[in-house]
Image (tube, rainbow, N blue to C red):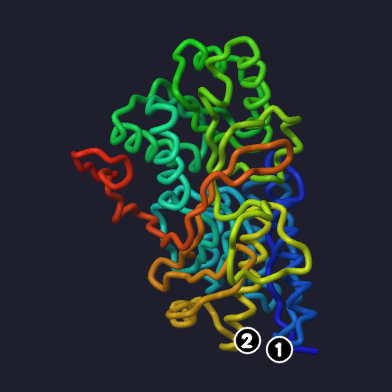
Amino acid sequence: MGRRIEIGILYSRSGNYRLLSESCRSGAMTAIADVNTDPAIPIEFVPVERDPQGNIDGYATGCADILANSGARHIIGCITSWSRKEVIPILERAGGTLWYACPYEGFEANEHIVYMHACPNQHLVPLLAYVVPRFGANGFLLGSNYIWGWETNRVARDLIADAGGKVLGERYLPLGEVDVSRLIAEIQATRPDFILNNLIGSSSYAFIEAYAELAGRDPHFRPERCPILSCNLTECELPALNDAGNGHLSVGPYFHDISADRPGGSAPSVMPASSFEAAAYASVRTLADVLARNPGAQWTDLPQAFAGTSFRTPIGDISIDPQTQHATLPVEIGRIDGTAFKTVTLTKGVAPDPYLSRYDRTETFGRSRLRVVS
């Protein structure tokens, strides 16, 4: 029996984005079980779980409760950027660390957070670089009305301008809103080359199903002509689409596509079914590696633990930048095929650039004029 270490788990088991939460939680709990049965790892994780129940106020409360009433200093949790930002003040006061396993909008690097999923240069930039030459540069932007939608679409506006295109519309829905008729009408009227979908949960499912109906009436909106693009849609949500998403595109560090080449990756007891599950699993296993080498490591010890170190994960071998605490990740673009993705492109080892400080318009879109995203 290894040294027992409590670890926080902070995911909602209900609410608008329950499928994403359940995928992350599954990855974390599978990793905990694997760590606890691995004789090569001299620790045993004891999960301390709190369920915010989809209530934004529940994240700060749950985080504070874990840190105040258990020995856990590290928490695997949060789905939305809203919930992540809610817990940051708690982490800073209590000296805790959040391991965040979801894609996000970038422009953040907090020393109390380890960012284990993609930031914009690992999702939005390569996705648009792939789409624009094949479909065109004029886009319609959608988002749920909170940080992820606002900020991802802000960056997308700059990228579309850099590509010589136009934003033909930008619309937001409250979290959980499923009346998408106005969005469909505007998209049909403006006839963009692609739709960037930053809706989440039930809003996204309703839109994708309505868009499939539109494509049945108007061939312009078939996926081979005007695709829906997502930076956060994974396999865990595809059953909710009832095949309406077929042919559309998403990007992430991992798809459950056995044909994809991920040399060096670890072999968990169950291969993750989505990038959310894979990133949560990788968070726990990476934390276990850190604590096995440096017992009692807290947030102040992480930069040194990350420096010059590679970690084996289901995503592949990854490293974590000690300055920004963002992971170097593969970038995969996938096309929906039923309840799975078929990998279209795979780029290995893309270093994080959360502030897009190294973004080069000429390199991304092949144009002669340089314009830096602000």
Q: Quadrant of residue 340?
A: top right
Q: Residues within 10 Å of mark 2 (few under 14, many from 20)?
A: some
Say which of 149 and 366 sits in front.
Answer: 366
- The answer to whether the residue labelled 2 contacts the one labelled 1, judged by CB atoms less than 8 Å apart, is yes
Rendered view: 15 above or below 111: above
- Residue 24's spot in the image, x, y percent? 69, 56
Q: Looking at the figure, which quarter contains the C terminus?
A: top left
User: Which residue carries the number 1 mark?
Assistant: 42
Q: Quadrant of the N terminus?
A: bottom right
Residue 312's spot in the image, x, y percent? 60, 73
SS state under label 1: loop
How packed is label 1: few (under 14 Cα within 10 Å), some, or many (20 or more)?
Answer: some
Q: Residue at x 24, y 38 (%)?
A: 367
In front here: 72 or 263? 263
Pointer 2 or 1: first along the chain: 1
Total labels drawn = 2
- Amino acid type, label 1: Pro
Judge by depth and name the residue closer to the eye, 325 or 211: 211
Residue type highlighted by circle 2: Ala
Q: In 3D space, how far apart are the residues under numbered discs 2 and 1 (Cα atoms)?
A: 6 Å
Residue beneath disc 2: 292
Left or right for 276, reference 365: right
Q: Which mark is residue 171?
A: none
- Snapshot quadrant of residue 239: top right
Counting from the top left corner in percent of width and height, residue 364 is at 33, 45
Which residue appears farthest toward the left when viewing the image? 369
Task: Tell me which residue sits at (65%, 43%) in the image.
Answer: 341
Where is residue 211? Give x, y as percent: 62, 21
Using the image, determine if residue 244 lies above or below residue 151. above
Residue at screen point 61% across, 60% down? 279
Residue located 40% across and 45% down the image:
125
